[in-house]
Image (cartoon, grey):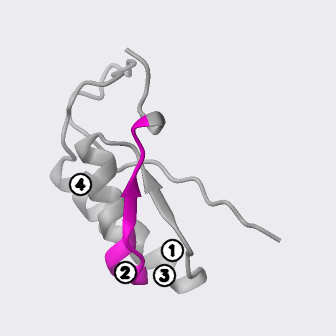
Amino acid sequence: MTTIILTRHGHVDWISPERFRGRAEIPLSELGQRQAKALGQRVAQTWKPDAIYTSPLGRCVRTGAEIGEATGTKPEILDDLADTH
């Protein structure tokens, strides 16, 4: 059986009021960086991913990198995972 785990990147500034950001290149805030690291640790405690796929946006790449570092799995960037404009 295949298990798919969907995650979202950590906090970014410019989040209030909540709005669609599309492909705006907004980096993780300091809080978001801590959240990404915690997410990586949480995933590593529960699963051993065979693959990690991330959108090309920096905040997503950073989050995927934290998961990859914690699990020993190299993330792969997929352009098709980007939001629409």
Q: What residue is shown with label 3?
A: 44
Q: Nearer the viewer, mark 2 or mark 4?
A: 2
Front-most of residues 54 and 33: 54
> Residue flagged by tag 3: what amino acid is it?
Ala
Q: Can residue 77 be seen in this snapshot?
A: yes
- Look at the numbered discs 2 and 3 and tell me whether their residues touch, using CB distance below 8 Å: yes
Mark number for residue 31? 4
> Residue flagged by tag 2: what amino acid is it?
Ala
> Which residue is painted at 83% across and 71% down in the image?
1
| Circle 1 Cα neighbour tier, 10 Å, few/some/many (<14 / 14–19 / ≥20) | some
Which type of secondary structure does the marked residue at label 4 adopt? helix
Which type of secondary structure does the marked residue at label 1 adopt? helix
Which type of secondary structure does the marked residue at label 2 adopt? helix
Front-most of residues 19 and 52: 52
Q: What stretch is highlighted in magenta?
A: 67-79
Q: Earlier in the sequence, mark 4 or mark 3?
A: 4
Q: What residue is shown with label 1?
A: 43
Whole-angstrom CA distance, mark 2 to mark 4, is: 18 Å
Q: Nearer the viewer, mark 4 or mark 3?
A: 3
Q: Earlier in the sequence, mark 1 or mark 4?
A: 4
> Which residue is painted at 31% across and 69% down in the image?
66
Percent x, y for residue 28?
22, 47
